[in-house]
Image: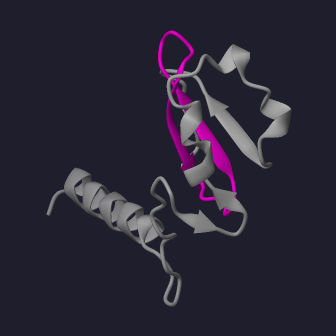
Amino acid sequence: MTMPRIVMAASAAAFAAACATTPGEAPPPPMTNGQVERGCDVSELRYLVGQPVDEIDLDSLPSPRRVIPHGMAVTMDYVEGRLNLDLDPDRRVIRVWCG
């Protein structure tokens, strides 16, 4: 094996090891509309879909919450009980979800 191949193989192995979960660590469960988990219940918030975010009293919504503008990069960290509002380019809510 040549030196560049060895370096590439070692880099790939290190990357794979870094991405692996540790034993006993389960990935977070997927959340879907209507699912309730530790304070995040989107079933009663479905009326927000289609609403302009500027017309919503965000302080009246459960915390923690995150408003995600269209095209915005967000972290994929899982936070139990966090309410997320995805927006379209016109700043209307297109998805309400937990996590």
Tell me, yes or no, if residue 42 can be seen here: no
Relative to residue 81, is residue 1 drawn left or right? left
Q: Quadrant of residue 6?
A: bottom left
Position in image of residue 19 (x %, y %): 43, 65
Quadrant position of residue 10: bottom left
Q: Is residue 5 above or below residue 46?
A: below
Residues 52 and 71: in front is: 52
Residue 65 in the image: x percent, y percent? 73, 43
Query: Looking at the picture, how far across and down is residue 12, in whole percent?
Result: 31, 60
| Residue 46 vs residue 87, the one in the foreground | 46
**4 is higher (above) or lower (below) than 54:** below
Q: Which residues are magenta?
A: 77-99
Q: Quadrant of the N terminus?
A: bottom left
The image quarter in which residue 17 lies: bottom left
Outermost residue toward the top in this view: 90
Residue for point 65% across, 20% down: 53
| Residue 80 visible to an observer of this rendering | yes
Can you name the residue that lies furthest to the left here? 1
Q: How many numbered circles are shown?
A: 0
Answer left or right for 46 relative to 53: left
Q: Residue at x 49, y 80 (%)?
A: 26
Scheme of image coloration: one colour
Residue 96 colored in magenta in the image:
yes
Taking the magenta stretch, the answer to whether it contains residue 42 is: no
- Return the x and y of residue 41 as percentages of the image width and height: 63, 57
